[in-house]
Image (cartoon, helix red, strand yellow):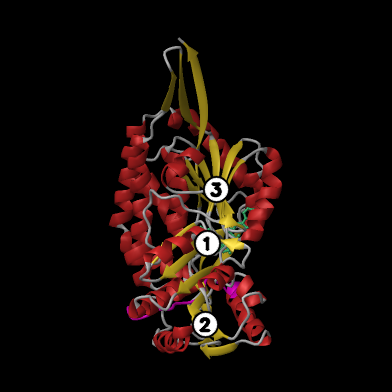
Amino acid sequence: MQKILNYINGELIEPVSGNFLQNINPATGACYSLCPDSDDKDVNLAVDAASKAFPGWSNTSASERSRIMLKLAALIEENNDRLAKAESMDQGKPFWLAQKGEIPRAKANIHFFATAIEHFASEAHPMGDHALNYTLKTPLGVVVCISPWNLPLYLFTWKIAPAIAAGNCVVAKPSEVTPMTAFLLAELCIQAGLPPGVLNIVHGLGPKVGPAMNTHPVVKAISFTGGTKTGAEIARTAAPLFKKLSLELGGKNPNVVFADCDFDKTVSESVRAAFTNQGEICLCGSRILIERSIYEKFKEAFVAKVKKLKVGDPLAADTMVGAIASELHFNKILSYIQLAKEEGGTILTGGSAVTPGPGFENGYFIEPTVIEGLSQYCRTNQEEIFGPVVTLTPFDSEEEALQFANSNEYGLASTIWTENLTKAHRFAAGIKTGIVWINCWLLRDLRTPFGGMNQSGVGREGGWEALRFFTEQKNVCIKL
Ligand code: NAD
């Protein structure tokens, strides 16, 4: 059985304890590899390696850091299909989605920050002719990056790329549910010539490895993407230690459909926004709010399209909905479908676990599920399900749509569908989410600030925001 290894000080090594966890293929429910069950001893080794590497790496020129990172980006591109297959087996997502979307995006993350760092400059603030301020931006030191299981390599690289580009050394932890592509990335880092200790990857259980990383006295900053509850726990333990924190957390995103939308495009894109990656994207539009005059027409067209989505083998080319990432999450989603029924919802399509064929009897597959008849204020519409489950709700006015959209403690992303751009701008100004898409979904420019409001997080990633997070600003004032 293949053993995934930690990547510490430039080497692939077993955890100190010698203990491993089973790594499950969610399409079959079978263990197919072993993941290190690391603990604080491994974290200490990783932090030591990062500390030792920091003086050298932080003094390396931006162009040299860029050169090595561009080599890594090229290696990800060369290994695109191998990484995509690994991601699909580990996470359950359709292979084509990883092949065409996520792995190219992982490459783009590395490429983007490798080039951005060469343009990241200090600012100067002259005070007439009597003084000059300049602001140095220096790397922080050893930083922690923790990522979730839904878009494994995509989100892992989104964090480590700005951190190492800015001259920091990193101790990173991918999710224990999907450790494989971070392991393969470690092999590529060695091939790319990344100096030992610049990136260290410690695999293992979140509650065991995470606190050891987050409370380590040497660690200066934590960039975390994951659930809101975990984010709160990290803030509770790390904030009193004055660690810099970036928290990208959960979402329960409204998808607002006005009667004057481009109907066919809105239906197709709303299906994509709801069910891509089995609905396991923090940005998925899971609360679909529809202007009452087109509610029935939209419902009919939407449900008809959802019924055509093929649930199947993640490696098959025609699969649109793969397996749910883990048994735990599979059971959580099914319990929410049950809750929706208890809360008075009507299942329009889906609602059950399925076996999409021989060999998948023990896999974690759920039919794409559409529910109507629920209040915006019930738990089904307030809590993050993070699976192939959406609700449809009619609204009567723009004011009511805004009230429904903002009725939630989360505030990550929203989507608005209307051909009336004045209304779209007005609505975008009123909605309380960090990201607003008008007549599109998941259209990303890596330069833009990315993050959520309220329980969806603290801080912004992307572009200069990420490079600012991973640097300390020091202002120097000179009296002339
Ligand atoms: P999770 O919070 O359970 O785990 C995320 C990571 O944190 C994993 O690596 C896990 O091992 C680790 N972890 C768990 N407990 C920890 C602790 N006490 N200290 C430190 N680390 C710990 O989240 P998940 O189930 O892996 O991911 C799903 C969640 O992530 C959803 O809520 C989703 O919305 C969110 N998410 C948010 C974004 C965003 O950009 N805002 C993107 C993707 C996913």
Q: Secondary structure at mark 3?
A: loop
x and y percentages locating residue 20 in the rendered image: 59, 60
Identify whether 29 is placed above or below 460: below
Residue in the foreground of this view, choosing between 281 and 448: 448
Residue in the foreground of this view, choosing between 126 and 237: 126
Residue in the foreground of this view, choosing between 476 and 178: 476
User: In the figure, is residue 350 to the left or right of 109?
Assistant: right
Q: Is residue 39 visible?
A: no
Mark 1 Cβ inside 8 Å of ligand 1:
no
Q: Quadrant of the C terminus?
A: top left
Q: Is residue 54 magenta?
A: no
Residue interval drawn in magenta = 316-329
x and y percentages locating residue 161 in the rendered image: 42, 46
User: The disc labelled 1 sits on which kind of residue?
Assistant: Ile
x and y percentages locating residue 328 in the rendered image: 61, 73
What number is the disc on residue 431?
A: 1
Q: Quadrant of ligand 1?
A: bottom right
Of the image marks 1 and 2, the number of the one nearer the N terminus: 2
User: The disc labelled 3 sits on which kind of residue?
Assistant: Gly
